[in-house]
Amino acid sequence: MKTKKLFPILSLFVCLVLPFFAVAEEPLTKPFKAIILPDGQKHPDGMTFNSKTKDIILAVPTIGDKGNAWLLKIDNDDKVEKYFELPAHPETGRVTPLGISFGPDGHLYVADSQCLGGNPNHKSRILRVIHEDGKPVKSEVLVTGITQANGLEIHANKIYVAETQIDPSIVEMPMVSGVFEFDINEFPASVKSPRRVINLPTRLPTPIHVLPYGDDKHFIYNFTTTDADRNGAQKVGANGIGVAKDGTLYVANFGDKEIIEIKLRRSKVISHRNIGISKSGLNESVDGLKVCPKGYIFYADYVGNAVLVANPANGKNVLIAKNKPNPSADEKTKGALDRCSEVCLRGDKLYVSNIDLEDNNTPHTISVIDIKGINFDDLLK
């Protein structure tokens, strides 16, 4: 009797209420393999594509460990080898490379996040790895005094660096973060034009020491993160950073699950906006990102353990791959994502760094996703 009486009520509930619940979107695909990093190389993060050699250069910060850190090379056959060893900070005894990018001068620029390495006292830096005949030969310090250098991207001669928090003492929301801009021509041995390289000086450049708390002239944009939906649980601000062909910047607001578009003219912000991807409900954070030639933004969602792509023109957000957090060693060997933090495009493949700051279990991997045949133009309309 009770079942018969309840049935019409349940049917009415299904008809009237369920249509208003969002249906979880299935990912387009999944990683088809993993690149296993050598023993001792853990917490892979920043990646950049070398358009001349077609190699991917990978930053491996080995977070928490003192000593030097390596940049690795992933060649066209996905073989991994050591590329360059970054020396530790002379005061802190560690170096924590995150964002990396090649400049038009052929040298490699690196964000050293000393805050993530354990020291929040304005010890983070920007480094440059000098290349001769396409080979890395030495490193030098260009900028000091940053709190938490994170994503790094270069457009023309401009170096853009995400400052994840301007005040290391802030523990409550909202928190302020933003973007530094430096000109390569501010540093000795830099390029005056993409086709002319000045001979390297015998002395190292004198580093620029930035003023704290966003007061430096190089600090061009700031914003706040509240993470209101989670009561401030994700206390991370500016993170990944990418740049479109026309110089438009896209900056990850990690805790607020958003991407901010910034347009500049002569190093001044002329417009900025939130592109609105969080409305989709598909992502739980925005970490490292890259802008493809068509202007779409591929990004890693560390909290959601997923990889997505967004169209800044309309805020459309599409889930590419996702799996449960903290996969087993066997699952990781087969390509599973493990707290991914960065993406890199090479041809029809998307490479994803698994920084794995939680379980920190072996193997340490890069997941590889085949995106050939996926029509992103239609998906992102």
Image (tube, rainbow, N blue to C red):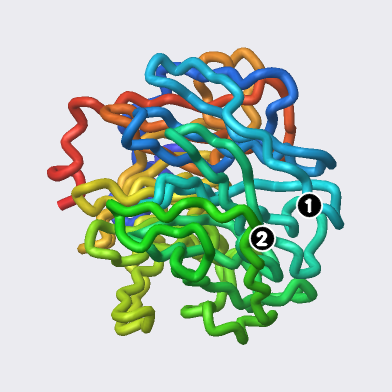
Left or right for 316, reference 64: left
Q: Is residue 291 above or below residue 2?
A: below
Q: Position of residue 340 (x, y in %)?
A: 55, 39
What residue type is disc 2 on?
Arg
Q: Position of residue 118 (x, y in %)?
A: 81, 54
Is residue 20 something one can see in this rendering? yes
Discs 1, 2 touching: Cβ within 8 Å:
yes
Q: Position of residue 86 (x, y in %)?
A: 68, 41
What residue type is disc 1 on?
His
For disc 2, the neighbor class at 10 Å (few under 14, some 14 to 19, many from 20) is many
Left or right for 193, reference 79: left
Is residue 8 something one can see in this rendering? no
In which image quadrant can residue 274 be found?
bottom left
Q: Which mark is residue 11?
A: none
Tag 1 residue: 89
Residue 287 vs residue 330, the one in the foreground: 287
At 38% across and 26% down in the image, what residue appears? 369
Q: Which mark is residue 125?
A: 2
